[in-house]
Image: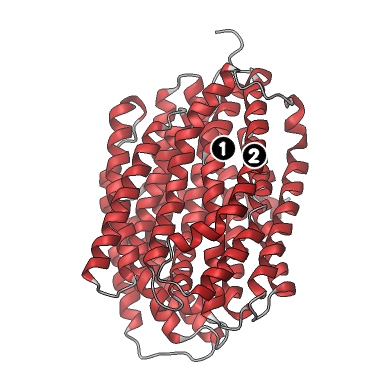
Amino acid sequence: MSGERKPESNPDRKQSNLSLATVLMMIGLLLSKLTGQLREILVVPVFGGNTGLSDAFFLGFQIPDLFYQLLVGGAIQAAITPTLAAAVERKKEKEGWRGVSIFINITAVVVLLAVFIGELLAPILIPLYNPNKSPAVIGLAVQVSRALFPQVFFMMLAALCIGVLNAYKRFQATAFGPPFYNICVILAMLLLGQATSSGPVRVAAGVLLASCAYFVLQFYLARREFHNYTLSFDHRDQDFRRLLKLAVPTLISGSIIQVNMIILTGFASGSGAVTALRNASTTWQLPYGIFAVAIGNVMLPSLAGLHAVGDHRGSRRLLTRSLRSALFMIVPSAALFLAMRQDVIRAIFQWSADYREDMITSAAGILGWYCVAMVGQTVVFIINQAFYARRITKFTLINGLLTLVLNSLLCLLFNYLDTGNLGNLSLSYTITSVISVVFMYILYSRNLPEAAPRRLWPFAVRLVICAAALLAVVMLLGMIPFNPAGKIMQLVWLLARSIIGIAAFMLVANWLKVAEVEDIKIKARNLIKKTVRKDKN
C-alpha cells in the first residue's frame, strides 16, 4: 500500500533501540521514584509528626487527582500516543495531527471548566466519603484541595506533551521531566512547609507552581513535534471522534483506579490511617513504577506501529517479551518487600523520631498484601498497553468497572466483620487485582489470538520457584539476632539481605534456564568486550 512504511529489516537493531529506550525510561523512572519517595518521606517531618496534618494533606490530593483521571488520565496512552505513532509509521503524520490537535484544544477547555467546578465542589465531596474523619482534618483537606485544583490543568498540558514525545519515541526527552517536577515539589515542601494548620495549604500552593514549571519544561522539549498542531475546535471531525471514542472508556477506567484508592481511604479509620495507607501504596509502586511502567510505555508506540503494518507475529513476540521482562524484575522486588516489609518501611520513612514505630507497624501491615498486588497490577498494566496499542479501550473499561465493584464489596465485607486490621484494605485490593489479571489475560487471548502472548505459564511457575528461594534465604537471614540501631547500619543490613536474596533468585533462575538470565549474561559479556576494546585502543 502506498504511503506505508515497511517494517524494519533489521530486527536486532530494532530490539537494541527498544532496549536502549527501556533503559533510559527506567533511569528516568528510577530518578522519578526516588525523588517522589523523598517527597513522601518529607511529609511527616515537615508537618512535625502531626498525623492530622499529614492525613489532611494526602486527602486534599485525592479529588484533584480524580478529576485529572476523569478528564485526561490514560486517554493519552490509549488515544494520542498510539494514534500519532501509527500515523508516523504510515507516513501520514499531518493527517494524524488534525484529530489530535482538536482533542488537545477541547480537552484544555473542558479541564479549565472542571477546575472551576472542582473548587466549588471540594467542600461537598471530601466529607462525603470521609464520615469517620475529624472535622478539623476534613476542613484542612478542603483547603488543600482548593489550592491544588489549578494543578490539574498544568499537569494535563504536561501529560499531553509527554504523550506526543512518546509517540515519536523520544523517550530521552520524557524520562527526566518527572524528577524535575518532584525536585520542585521538594523545594516547595522545605521552603513553605511548617507544622501549623496553614502548612499543608502553603505546600499545596508550592505544588501548583511546580506543576506550572513542569509543563513549561515538557512543552519546550516537545516544541518541534508540535509543528503540525492547529488551533481547531471542530468537534465534528471524524478523526477527533475516533480519538474521543478511544479516550472516553479509558478515562472512565483510569479514574476507577483513583476511585478505588478513595474507597480504601474512606474505610481507613483512626488517626494516621490515611498516612499509613499512602506510605504503603507509594512503597509498592516504587519497583512497579520503575520496571512495569517503563517497559509498558516503551512497548506501546512500537506495538502500535507493528499493528499498523499488520505484523501480528512481531506483535506477539514484543508483548510476550515485555511481559516476561516486567515480571522477571517485579517478582523478586515483591518477594523482597514481603520478606522485609517492616524493615523496608522503616528504611524509607523513619528518618526522625516523628515517624514512630506504631506508624511503621501500620504501614507494613498494609504493604504485605500489596506485594502480591504488585505482580498482578504489572500484568494488567502491560495487557492494558497492548489493548491501547490496537486502539481497543472497551475491555479496560469493563475491567475497571469490575475492579470497582469487587473492591467496594470486599471493603464492605471486611468492614462488616469489624476486624480493625488495616491490612484488610490491601487484601481487598489484592484479591481484586488477581481476579483482574485472569479476566484481562483471557480477554486478550480470546479477542486477539494471533497476537496473544505464548508460554507464560511455564515461565510463571519457574519465577515462583525462584521467588521461594529468595524468600527462604532472606527469612533465614532475618533470624540472625542482629538489630542495628543506627540508620546507616539499618540501610546496610537491608541492602546486604537484598543482594543475597537477589543472588539466590538469579542462581535458581540460571539453574532453571530462565531465558532472561541468559540475556543478562550475553549483555554483560558484550559490555566487557566493548570495554576491553576501548582500553586496547
Give the quarter of the figure containing the N terminus: top right
Q: How is the rendered protein coloured?
A: secondary structure
Q: Position of residue 482 (x, y in %)?
A: 40, 90
Residue 71's quadrant in the figure? top right
Residue 33's quadrant in the figure? bottom right
The residue singled out by tag 1 in the image is 76
The residue singled out by tag 2 in the image is 160
Label placed on residue 447: none
- Callout 2: SS: helix
Q: Say which amino acid is labelled 2.
A: Leu
Query: Residue placed farthest to the top in the image?
Result: 2
Disc 2 and disc 1: Cα gap in Å? 7 Å
Left-right relation of 403 to 66 = left
Going 35% across and 52% down the picture, which residue do you hit? 376
Going 39% across and 38% down the picture, which residue do you hit? 396
Q: Nearer the viewer, residue 347 or 132?
A: 132
Going 60% across and 17% down the picture, which residue do you hit? 237
